[in-house]
Image (tube, rainbow, N blue to C red):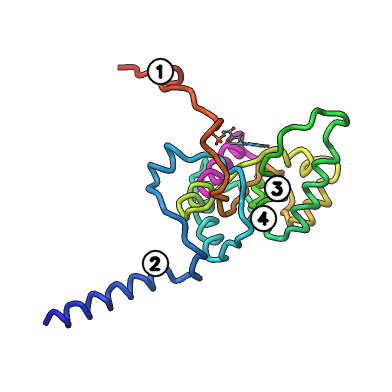
Amino acid sequence: MLDLFVFCCALLFGHFNVIFHNESPIAAAPKQQSTLEILTTAKTATKFTAEPISEGHIRQILLAGLNAPSARNSQPWHFSVVTNKKILNQINEAMLAGMPKGAPASPRKLGLADATVAIFVYGTNNLPSDSFDCGLATEAMSIAALSLGYGTKIVSSPTIVLNGAKKADFDQLLQIPKGYSNVAVLLIGHNDKSVDTTTGGSTRSPMEQKVRFIK
Ligand SMILES: Cc1cc2nc3c(=O)[nH]c(=O)nc-3n(C[C@H](O)[C@H](O)[C@H](O)COP(=O)(O)O)c2cc1C
């Protein structure tokens, strides 16, 4: 009888495994946190390893973005997902070329060229809320990626070059539909755990400074 019970449990567990993990298995699945834990503690990634991300996970992350709320359900976004390092390097080079000459060298930060996956978030400019909605979608994808155990970084610095004089070339490269401009880029990768992200990390203003409770 006990054997039968154990057998049934194994079958059931196996079934749920199929339902919930029908995508390709994750290479060394990182520790997963609760959504609340992520929202109240997550920080911007500082270094990625070279480990790839499965297409199944990329699609799950994109679904979170596509499911974001938007004003009048206008869904004013377009996402171009780039895993091609040559393209990321090309855009990164264009960004560097556009930097003012003689500008002081800033400390090396995680950038486009370091991303395992870069989701280029583009938006229309039909409603005043379009870029806000794109921000919601970007954050939703970031939280999804974090909840799958990846590191993320949102960057808006590429917008200058992507929406600049060579916009048409970049639009073609990234297959952007007509009428869309770049809002931000979400960088995703496996966190390099050998890097100290706590010491000297950024802080947030306390609740007393940023919140008023009106009773
Ligand atoms: C809309 C947006 C644009 C950002 N653009 C850049 C950027 O261009 N370059 C960069 O290094 N970080 C960028 N960041 C990352 C912020 O600097 C980072 O979220 C903030 O400093 C908090 O850091 P923390 O998450 O490590 O606490 C951006 C973040 C957001 C939300």
Amino acid type, callout 4: Ser
Q: Residue 202: where, in percent of width, then height?
A: 55, 30
- Label 2, on which residue? 20
- Label 3, on which residue? 112
Magenta stretch encompasses residue 98 = no
On the picture, is 40 further left or further right than 106? Answer: left
CA separation, marks 1 and 2?
41 Å
Amino acid type, callout 1: Glu
Q: Sequence order check: which comes first, mark 3 or mark 1?
A: 3
Determine which of the numbered discs, if any, sits on residue 208 in the image.
1
Depicted 117 relative to depicted 131: above or below: below
Amino acid type, callout 3: Leu
Choose between 50 and 136: the one closer to the eye. 50
Choose between 212 and 110: the one closer to the eye. 110
CA separation, marks 3 and 2?
31 Å
Q: Looking at the image, do the residues carrying marks 3 and 1 touch, with CB atoms under 8 Å apart?
A: no
Depicted 7 relative to depicted 130: above or below: below
| Residue drawn at (80%, 28%) of the image | 104
Asked which secondary structure carries label 2, the reply is helix
Q: Nearer the viewer, mark 4 or mark 2?
A: 2
Looking at the rendering, the stretch of residues picked out in magenta corresponds to 126-141
On the picture, is 161 further left or further right than 111? Answer: right
In the rendered image, the quadrant that contains the C terminus is top left
- Total numbered badges shown on the rendered structure: 4
Q: Residue 146: where, in percent of width, then height?
A: 49, 49
Q: Looking at the image, do the residues carrying marks 4 and 1 touch, with CB atoms under 8 Å apart?
A: no
Q: Nearer the viewer, mark 3 or mark 2?
A: 3
Q: Categorize mark 2 by other alpha carbons within 10 Å: few (<14), some (14-19), many (20+).
A: few
Q: Categorize mark 4 by other alpha carbons within 10 Å: few (<14), some (14-19), many (20+).
A: some
